[in-house]
Amino acid sequence: MAKKPSVYLLWGQQRTNDRKTKRRGSNRVRGCGVSKAYCPKLQINRIKMKLYCLSGHPTLPCNVLKFKSTTIMLDCGLDTTSVLNFLPLPLVHSARLSKLPGWISKDGTVNLEKELKECAGRVFVDSQPEFCVPERELLDLSTIDVILISNYHCMMALPYITEHTGFTGTVYATEPTLQIGRLLMEELVNFMERVPKAQSATCWKNKEIQRILPGPLKDAVDVWIWKRCYSMQEVNSALSKVQLVGYSQKVELFGAVQVSPLSSGYSLGSSNWIIQSHHEKVSYVSGSSLLTTHPQPMDQSSLKNSDVLILTGLTQMPTANPDGMLGEFCSNLAMTIRAGGNVLVPCYSSGVIYDLLECLYQFIDSANLGTTPFYFISPVANSSLEFSQIFAEWLCHNKQSKVYLPEPPFPHAELIQTNKLKHYPSIHGDFSSEFRQPCVVFTGHPSLRFGDVVHFMELWGKSSLNTIIFTEPDFSYLDALAPYQPLAMKCVYCPIDTRLNFHQVSKLLKEVQPLHVVCPEHYTQPPATQSHRSDLMLELQPPPMPYRRCSVLNLPFRRRYERVYILPELANSLVPSEIKPGISVATVSAVLHSKDNKHTLQSIPKPPPVPPSKKRKRVMEEPPVTPAPKPLLSGAVPLEAFLTTLQKHGITEVKVEETADGHILHLQAEDTLIQLEEDGTHIVCDNNEPLRTTLRDLVLRFLQKL
Amino acid sequence: MDGECVSLLPGVCKVLADSGRSLPDDTSLEKLLDWFTGLSKTGGSLLESCPCLLEFISTVGSNTALDPGVLSFALRLAGLIAAREAGFTVLQERSVVDLVFNPQHWQDAGLWSDPCIRIGWIQGLQNMLQHPKALSFFVQSDLTQLLLQLQADTSLFVASAASQLLGHILLRFQPPPSSRREGTGETAEDHQGTSVEYAAVVVVISEYIQKSLSTEGSTQHRRSVQLLRLLALLLAQAGPPLRDTLLQAVGDALKELVAAGCSQLTLPLMDVILAAHSCGADKPDRHLSCLLSSMFSVNKPADLIQAAAAFLRRGLHDSDHSVWAVRILLLPLDIVTGRSLLGSKDLDEHRLSTAEELKIKNSCISLLCLCLTNTPHITLLPADLLPCPPGLIVTAVLALLSISSGQNSASSSPTATSCTEVSRNVIGSSKVQKCALEALAALSCCPGGKEKMNEVFTVLLQYLDSPDSDPTVLHKSYLALIKWMSLCTNLSFLTEQLRQDLLSVVRKRVCDVRWEVRDSTVEFVGKAAGVLTSPEEAPEGLPVSTAPLLKEALQDTESYVRASAIGALAQTQWHSWQQGAALTQQQTETVSRLLEILSQDTEGFARRAVVQYFISWFSAVSSHASPSSSISSYPSASLLMNSVRSVLSFGSADLDWEVKVHTLELARLLLDEAFLAEWGYRKSPDSYAGDSERTCRLHTHSRGVESDLAGVLTSLVELGVISALLSGLVDCDRPVALKACRLLIRLRDTVSWDSESQDASAAMATVTRVSCELPGWGWGQEIKKVLESKSSDWASKDCATALILSGADDGDSDQDGGDRMHAGVCEVLRSLGLDERLDILSQSSDHVHNSPLSLLQDILDASAAHTHPNTQPGQEVIVDCY
């Protein structure tokens, strides 16, 4: 019977958030391990949990959870939509872009000719594009213990957090997340560094000036915190802090909480996270998908019984069904090629592109596109295509089983082998000599502000035979196209977002039944453009707690219990007595030892043996220094039996009065009162100690002693 | 009856009456009974043609140790024999009727508990109860009570058969109206006797129905449904006296049932009420009107709308209730779309309950679908029955489609909040979408619909463009589009934008990932070309702009799409063919591509479509060519005729029987064309026409035309028509052989000569010189074999050799090693025994297997096998299992 005994110990003291006390410390206490019903009323300490929201973008989240003395950052998304305010960075000299007129206010008082250019009726910032990084002022980011990354799209701001904030913690992510995330960062750095721009525009950010700028620059928010892209060195340093984890692997954080990634089904290695202590469970759901695409399917059952579920990363296109969009993509592609035009697909170098290629692999023959070349141009194209084939354990079952066959999991390998798909690091070099039209080009960046895509926009934009098909949902395609207007090429918007939609998430939440749901405020109302679509919002009971950038939420969730271990020898010394069938109690005198958020009750060390001496002998006969604890009493005094007993002891004149809590017995002859109440018995008797003692003993006869 | 069958029947009866013998399978008795039923229906007396049956029934009836299946068979057979008065009398004289239809007899034998016996008894009675004597027997034997008890039988089949028998008795013996009685041969006494017994039965049965409905109406729904069905059947067919009696009996019970408002009984109750209502006098009965009104005031939206739909479907002239039913049916559409279709607020009570019901997803969808299905019918009702103009209903259906696609919200109305909740159930529901699209297609015929054309096109194009529309929804959208397009002959009524949108959506969908969508799109293009017949259709109009898409679709990986594309191409070119327009280079390329498909495509669908393409082309041209001008005057005649030659050659050698049948259809057109121009030959409307459709023989040939006949025949030979027909004749697929045979007979009859005529020999000489080539392999050899066998029948081998004019005349041997032969067409036609062959081919391929003779033989054989000493027990079971 080696079952480790445990008791519930109720705190009596507020814990501080000090790191030192968080990790070590000990206390000596005297407590009693009794069932709740017989427990004396102790002050229950309730520690609040807080969520700090550092990003306003629902699919590129960055939140910090303070939970049980740990500070956990959940994702580190980088909002890149800010780049839409900047001019594109052309790979080769563009006469059109270099001749754009500078912007001067109408009255001529503000001249920002060097910083802002007018292009196609809008004003753009002419400098290296900048990103909207997570909020850094809301809390001290150096106090963050760990960062949990859920997928490679949600880690792009990592260098901004780990490199210049004093961060000393660990980043947890799965291997594909780390590797593909690295590729995406590398690609981003490459895109920026390939076309260096010395100029840095800052004047327009001046509040007074920004106010008079035309939209959408006028309405851009938090422009002062926009940052230029990090360097490769910073990327490497940031990624060196990543510790790899596997699905369902449990990672202990200071003994206080355990975190564990679960498959979220969205992308290779994408995860949701469970953060739990012995008595509390928080689920973090970010970028999940229930569709059967290439990644491992979503683990839903482990999300059950959460106290709080933080829900982010739902689809950005709730009305666009991915299957339908994939169909649109294919038919528009075929239509353009048949008419002799080229197709440009601005995309990220990993993710949906694998599914697009797989779909095209099946579609090519049926649409008679067998001879059309497909080009994938990205500095990391080769690595991305290869990586996808080697992360077998992170793939869906269907693809995993192909590992045992000669064919690779993704069919793009065959497209490459048969020369239907060719990949190049950039438009320079081999590509320019092998380029054949009409063709299909997959290249980044989906914002159309940098990367090889800028070149193709300049090249193909003027012909109505060509088509640009947007598949990435992160950018408004109209804004992306703004600096290229007027544009003759056809534009097709087929955003493919496989993340959960509202229908799926409602079903999921019905199944996993969290007590509370926290989500971005966007999810609590229908999209602004479709206010009649009440089906495109979360409707829950109780309603979800919404957050926005810079919100600090007190989570509606209180910690009540803490687990305390009792060492075996101490447990052996306990003498439980049964107070009612099945429930035994025992008193415990012990030292409470707390270290790394683990609490252990240890036996009180015996005092060092005192050498026998005559002088001390008398002392030894005296009661010990620590008096034996008085027995604890339990039970109730039955009135009739007690009266009978009193009568036997010669007390006959008793007047019984019923009160709200019990009875008052008035012993008239003795002029003494006995108050029998539910939780106490009082004998009020003046100057008659023998009588009080007798009465006390009579009462005690009816009570159990521990 | 076949003599052979008559001779086998006694043996079969013996087998059946012998309890130890087994039957080939459990359907044998049913087949045998079907045969007897057929025989008795043809008018002959069963007892006269098969006297052994009397003995059989008497023996079997008293042998209760027999298999219940055989006993049940005997009961039904006895009924069949007794269905005629003569048979009844014979059976009664032998006391067979009293024995077999006496339930006590079966109860004593302990067999009544077997449902097989009970159902045999019921069906036997039903067979027998065709004349007054049988009814007298039924009444005098006091079988009515038992029959009523059987209505509640534990076996559903028995209960249902018993219910049918009740109906049969009441309807069969209704006193004929006085006008009908004359000439039926019934004497007044006869009828009097019957009517007394009949009246007694009617009273008993109506009391029974009334009592059962009142006691079981609210509890036993299954029984009530059965009773109501019986009642509906009776009321629909009953004459006035019976109907009045029944209605009087069940009136109160029906009222109670209606008031109980049980959902499961809504439809059966409506059937009863409507059956009574529709056969009543011009002015509806007051009680029935009350019942209907009660049905329409139940406050359960689902029941209410079902009742309303049932009422409208019946098409009764009851304007009060029609107005009400229309309002009920339109209510869900009114609520969901927020269009005030109903105007006034007299449906307030129902509006609330319906709005509540619509908030539940399943109910919402089923209510809306019922409503939508009925909208086309509603718009065709007289205007005074409608609460709004039909155009508004079209607008509401369009609004519903918009809501369902997530495009629009319901327009603001007092119930807007509930609308939001309801529209959530409708958004993305493909069931609602399909139903609404079907309704919209049917609404194209509604008065004033044409004004809504642009609105309709806008919504349909939204659906066609939406990435979320599933293939069935897209298909239905196309169908609706075609329906609406067919209201006009060109697209000029559409805005320029809509025309552009239509073109671009078609261009996109023809490249869809899903083959079903590509298929529907290609089909649409073809149908649209068929509908848009106006010459005003601009060059950039739909048919012209979509032709390249169809050509592209000929390369599709899916054979259905290729087939549809070929069909669509034919439809788009029909007008230019008819108008005799010169072929473009593109069309010439298409023709060679089609011939390539016919010769190489691995899928039958595409090849069938190619043959049909040429059928269409040829028909278009020949319908255009006037009787005086021939096809040769047509601009692309040579391309057409060369192609037809190839089609006949490839098509008749195809592996797919349908391709071959289509090829023969083309041959038929060629025959029609060839003889029509010269001879005033009557075109056959249907290639499968039987003897009656055979063309008249051309007895009116005059001297000089025989050489033309020879010329026509020669051209048919050269085109390959004769080869196609001959190869078809010996084809192993019956439909092919049958069609070829019919065409050959027509050809034979056309070219045959009245040998008695003076000019016969001279004319014969010219025509008989026309010969065709028979290959030395395959069908050529088959034909040769047929000719040889026929000539041996005639005991004149020389004749066969005479038919074959020459073999391998030029010394070339066929590729397969066989020698080619030439044969005189006329002689071949005469010598193939075509009429005999037609008789054989006209029978279904299993006619031998399914013949009564085969059945009788099977029964005898099975019994012989069973009693054979060498047969192991269980052996036949194994054979059966196999």
Image: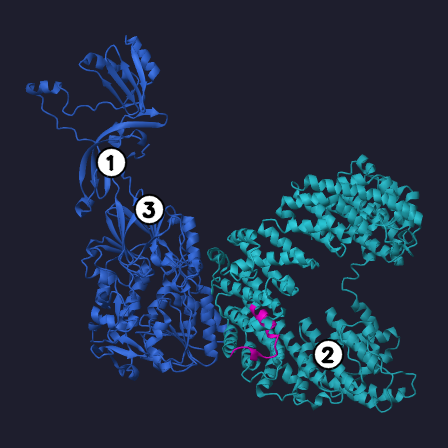
Q: Quadrant of residue A477?
A: bottom left
**What predominant SS class does the magenta segment belong to?**
helix
Q: Which residue is mark 3?
A: A281
Q: Which residue is mark 2?
A: B724
For the colour blue, the matching chain is A
How crowded pointer 1 is (Cα within 10 Å; few <14, some 14-19, many 20+) is rated as few
Q: Label 3 sits on what residue type?
A: Lys
The colour scheme of the drawn protein is by chain
How crowded pointer 2 is (Cα within 10 Å; few <14, some 14-19, many 20+) is rated as many
Q: Label 1 sits on what residue type?
A: Gln
A165 on left or right of B295 = left
Identity of the residue drawn at 25% across and 14% down: A695
Magenta highlight range:
B477-495
Q: Nearer the viewer, residue B640 or B682?
A: B682
| Nearer-N-terminus badge (1/3) | 1
Q: Secondary structure at mark 3?
A: strand
Q: Label 2 sits on what residue type?
A: Ala
Give how far apart the Cα atoms at labels 3 and 2 are. Answer: 81 Å
User: What number is the disc on residue B622?
Assistant: none
User: What number is the disc on residue A43?
Assistant: 1
Question: Tag 2, which chain?
Answer: B
Percent x, y of residue B73: 81, 47
Percent x, y of residue B441: 60, 68
For the colour cyan, the matching chain is B
Q: Quadrant of the C terminus of chain A?
A: top left
Q: Quadrant of residue B474?
A: bottom right
